[in-house]
Image (cartoon, rainbow, N blue to C red):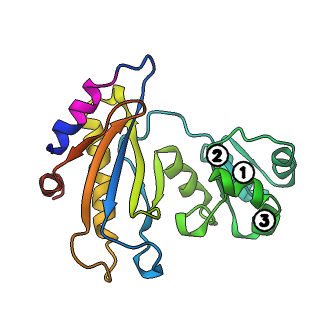
Amino acid sequence: KHGFDEAVRMALDASYAKFDETIDVAVRLGVDPRHADQMVRGTVVLPNGLGKEIKVLVFAKGEKEKEALDAGADFAGNDDLVEKIQGGWFGFDKAVATPDMMGTVGKIGRLLGPRGLMPNAKTGTVTFDIARAVSELKAGKIDFKVEKAGIVHVPMGKVSFGVEKIVQNATAFLETIIRLKPASSKGTYLKGIAVSTTMGPGFKIDTASIKDLIK
């Protein structure tokens, strides 16, 4: 097992793809997500972003629609956008909605949900504070939740970022995960961590080395 910086460096060195691969981190937690009180989910703004432009769509009306566009949203509207999506258009990465729009957005829930595009109050994407939601998503805010096997998978940026920026992103994520430890989780919480590129092998990290990252 490796120190965190070393594992990231090895993953970068192992990247031979002809494209700028994404670096992923997988964390195995000592929780059983079948129990509601051990569900770990949250959001984190990665300090160095994800290395790609995030296209943000906002469901809003009137002043809030204008606020969305002023804040940098790529698309903002209401029934017009719902119709486009019903017609098979999904030219965006994240969706935000004001609470009063959720009745309308609910009509296309079965289209948005499976693609991970449904606005959700828990991840801060159903809100009247549209400007903040848009700017955070544009800055590289990601949301995560633990899967059945107790694993959380998240992207940490691109190979071209280099070790330092990836480690900074990973540190922000790990600090958030540790802060979210459920009170009912007994025993070891961070059971395992691995880092890999899109096509490359995974490198296991010595979980003890995480203490050096997190101040």
Q: Earlier in the sequence, mark 2 or mark 3?
A: 2
Q: Which residue is mark 2?
A: 70
**x and y, in percent, of residue 2 in the image:** 15, 43
> Which callout, 1 or 3, points to the residue nearer the camera?
3
Q: Give the residue number, with chain letter if any, for mark 1.
A: 66
Task: List the residue tagged with mark 3.
Answer: 106
Q: Is residue 36 magenta?
A: no
Q: Is residue 210 left or right of residue 117?
A: left
Magenta range: 8-15
Q: Position of residue 67 (x, y in %)?
A: 67, 53
The span from disc 2 to disc 3 (Cα, nearest Å) is 25 Å
Place of residue 146 in the rendered image (x, y in percent of width and height, measured from the top left): 43, 63
Q: Amino acid at mark 2?
A: Asp
Q: Position of residue 185 (x, y in %)?
A: 30, 78
Q: Is residue 181 left or right of residue 34?
A: left
Q: CA distance from mark 1 to mark 3?
A: 22 Å
Q: Nearer the viewer, residue 23 or 97?
A: 23
